[in-house]
Amino acid sequence: IYDHLLTKGYNIGYTTVCNYIRQKENKTKECYIKQVYSPGMSTEFDWGDVKLYINDKLLIENDPIEVAL
């Protein structure tokens, strides 16, 4: 890379190129792992505001929500 930059006319030091590459190599990369489940084998769980009124009486509020996928 250093030699290529010199042939392109850049006035840059070898150590500068090495430091730049080292910085890019050591940078943590974010990744995602796709997970696939058979129908009925996964569940999502989260907290949410749930209000259930029966006969004008509040029975449930701010409970977990579970959704089967």
Image (spheres, helix red, strand yellow):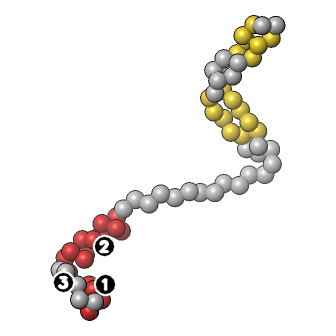
Above/below status of 68 relative to 1: above
- Residue 56 screen position, x and y as percent: 77, 7
Q: Which residue is mark 2?
A: 21
Q: Which residue is mark 1?
A: 1
Above/below status of 19 relative to 14: above
Q: Which residue is mark 3?
A: 11
Dot 1 alpha-carbon crowd within 10 angstroms: few under 14, some 14 to 19, many 20 or more: few
**Residue type highlighted by circle 3:** Asn
**Residue type highlighted by circle 2:** Ile
**Residue at the spot x=63%, y=27% of the render?**
48
Q: Nearer the viewer, residue 17 or 57?
A: 57
Left or right for 9, reference 41:
left
Above/below status of 11 relative to 20: below
Asked if labels 1 and 2 touch by Cβ distance under 8 angstroms, the answer is yes
In three-dimensional space, the C-alpha distance between marks 3 and 1, rounded to whole angstroms, equals: 13 Å
- Residue 39 screen position, x and y as percent: 81, 48
Above/below status of 6 relative to 58: below
Q: Quadrant of the N terminus?
A: bottom left
Q: Nearer the viewer, residue 64 or 54?
A: 54
**Badge 3 or badge 2: first in the primary sequence:** 3
**Residue type highlighted by circle 1:** Ile
Q: Quadrant of residue 36?
A: bottom right
Q: Secondary structure at mark 2?
A: helix
- Residue 8 screen position, x and y as percent: 28, 89
Question: Tag on residue 52?
Answer: none
